[in-house]
Amino acid sequence: MKGGYANPIEMKLFVNDRQIDLAPGMTVRHALIGAGLFDEALAGEKVFDEWGNEVGLDGALCENAKIYVGMKTRKG
């Protein structure tokens, strides 16, 4: 954050607990590409949010979203 405001051209999210920075409006697909995990999703690995819900590759993301590839969640 610069000047106390969130950067409007970047949002922070987490893929398998690794921070990824993307432009607002990007999808789960873009996050997986940024994390180098898109091939796993194409191979059939499922993608879940932090609550264990399966999400699609075209799913929307928001600031501080947490998604996981091939596992329900890291928490449990």
Image: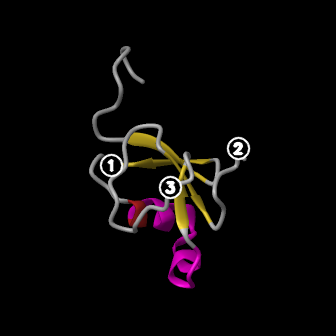
Q: Residue at x 46, y 40 (%)?
A: 12
- Position of residue 46 relative to residue 24, above or below, is below
Where residue 35 sits: x, y (%)?
55, 61
Question: Element type at marker 3?
Answer: loop
Within-10-Å neighbours for mark 1: few <14, some 14–19, many 20+:
few
Q: Is residue 29 left or right of residue 41?
A: left
Q: Which mark is residue 75?
A: 2
Three-letter amino acid code at the position of disc 1: Ala
Between the residue at mark 1 and the residue at mark 3, the CA separation in whole angstroms equals 23 Å
Residue drawn at x 47%, y 37% is 64
**Residue 75: quarter of image:** top right
Q: Are marks 1 and 3 in contact (CB under 8 Å)?
A: no
Instruction: Report the magenta residues as a range.
Output: 30-45
Give the image location of residue 70, x and y in percent: 64, 68
| Residue 37 falls in image quadrant | bottom right
Res. 53 mark: 3
The CA distance from mark 1 to mark 2 is 27 Å
Q: Could you tell me which secondary element the residue under label 1 belongs to?
A: loop
Task: Please name the residue shown 44% across and 61% down the image.
Answer: 55
Would you say 31 lies left or right of 8 here?
right
Density class for disc 3 (Cα within 10 Å; few <14, some 14-19, many ≥20) is few
Identified by mark 2, the residue type is Lys
Q: Magenta span has 44? A: yes
Labelled disc at residue 38: none
Asked whether 1 or 57 is in front, the reply is: 57
Q: Amino acid at mark 3?
A: Asn
Label 2 to label 3: alpha-carbon separation: 13 Å
x and y percentages locating residue 74 in the rendered image: 70, 49
Q: Which residue is mark 1?
A: 23
